[in-house]
Amino acid sequence: MKRMILIVLMMMATADAAIVEPAAPSTGDLLKYDGTNWVAASGYVHSYDWPSGSGWSGTNIFTCDNNYHTLDISTNILGVKIVPADAKGVFLRVALNDDTVGSYLRFRKQGYTNSVNVLRPLIQVANVTVELNGLVGIGTNGLIEYNAPASLSNASLIYLVMTGYTY
């Protein structure tokens, strides 16, 4: 009986010892403990230091024909590389104003075909600005897609800025 209790106590001590996490290395990276090792964790980077004006604005930058088009958000805005290759998603802030009720912009991950899970600011009242913030997945090489109807070609305001990204 004493041996059995000792074995159980040893097993409990071994199980407790496995729960102890080693100290995280001080690399400055966001890390998580996976039960065995410290590994890079996903995270969020806010755009505090991106230059002002680091976005797209104007009606001439979007093709307005109710088809999806590719928008490269990885390369650079104002000469600054803003989204790293390992980014998984980008937070967008969109402002839209148009005199046509029902006008919209849609943003989605490149190659995504489901029409439900898209970022979509929608004009509900003519000539009233709609602002929307949301997360869009990033496709291969930092590409996303957008869709704009032909009626949006005369919009009084189209503004898109990245406010951060996930990795």
Image: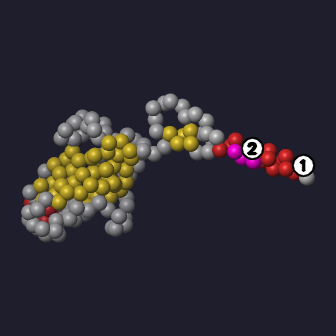
Mark 1 vs mark 2: in front: 1
Q: Nearer the viewer, residue 143 or 87?
A: 87
N-terminal of the pair, mark 1 or mark 2, is 1
Task: Give the numbered dot on residue 2.
Answer: 1
Residue at mark 1 to residue at mark 2: CA–CA distance: 16 Å
Residue 112 visible to the viewer: yes
Q: Position of residue 82 (x, y in %)?
A: 31, 39
Q: Which mark is residue 13?
A: 2
Q: Measuring 90% from the left and 49% from the top, which residue is drawn there?
A: 2
State the residue at coordinates (12%, 55%).
157
Give 119 or 27, whichever is nearer the viewer: 27
Stretch of the chain drawn in magenta: 12-16
Q: Residues within 10 Å of mark 1 (few under 14, many from 20)?
A: few
Whole-percent x, y for residue 9 in the image: 79, 47
Drawn side of residue 45 relative to residue 7, left or right: left
Q: Is residue 28 left or right of residue 57?
A: right
| Residue type indicated by callout 1 | Lys
Does residue 145 show up? Answer: no
User: Is label 1 in a helix, a strand or a loop?
Assistant: helix
Task: Give the dominant element type of the magenta stretch: helix, strand or loop.
Answer: helix
